[in-house]
Image (cartoon, rainbow, N blue to C red):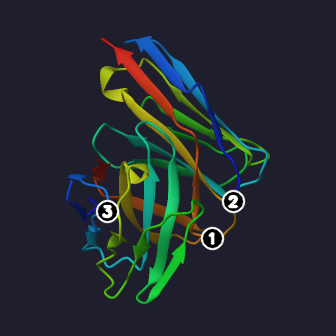
Amino acid sequence: TQLLEQSPQFLSIQEGENLTVYCNSSSVFSSLQWYRQEPGEGPVLLVTVVTGGEVKKLKRLTFQFGDARKDSSLHITAAQPGDTGLYLCAGAKNFGNEKLTFGTGTRLTIIP
Amino acid sequence: EADIYQTPRYLVIGTGKKITLECSQTMGHDKMYWYQQDPGMELHLIHYSYGVNSTEKGDLSSESTVSRIRTEHFPLTLESARPSHTSQYLCASSERYGRVFQETQYFGPGTRLLVL
């Protein structure tokens, strides 16, 4: 099993601040995804990155896949209370392997 | 919008009881998954299926069993519940799209199980 470590585990910041969440592994992944999970619900896919060095933007969220495809980051600009939730990265080991390995999670709280 | 349903949403049950957690999806997805998640923690894959009559154990050992008799239905059964089974159980289904492999997993809302 390839372990995906996320940091920080918990993050609580004021509305309007910027933040970055990291997802690191010693293994190479063919693709990496970020999900957000709200209390009482299942995770919802935010983005998929497949190319080393790839950067994708989703409104105030910027996702980057590391050049070596072992790590990823999620940057949120001007955080809002609606960004509160559990952020999970998930990697697929190789193309055609549909099983995902989920990261350890980052619980983000945005204080109004 | 994903159409994947789980029942019950919450279940409190005594030790030794047999329980079945239901999961259904109306998207026609071949692939379905069961994950176990402790509150605010990572997801651990316990079972998956790539189609009817296909089931495999996941990365985390589990005493539960699953069946896949119909494409849309993937129930999980615990023959004798124990307090150690207390957790949240999430069902998901997936589709593959695009020229390059990219999978989207759609999750149900989960079942929170408490075994007393």
Q: Is residue B112 above or below residue B27?
A: above
Left-right relation of B26 to B98:
left
- The span from disc 2 to disc 3 (Cα, nearest Å) is 43 Å
Chain on which label 3 sits: B
Q: Which residue is mark 2?
A: A30
- Nearest the eye: B44 or A22: B44
Residue B16 disc label: 3
Q: What residue is at 72 percent from the left and 41 percent from the top?
A: A66
A25 shown above or below B89: above
Q: Is residue B86 above or below residue B50?
A: above
The disc at residue B24 is: none
Residue A58 showing in the rendered view: no
Query: Between B88 and A104, which is closer to the camera in this rendering?
Result: B88
Q: In this rendering, would B10 be left or right of B59?
A: left
What residue is shown at x 52% (from left), y 54% (from top)?
B44
Reading the image, the residue beneath label 1 is A97
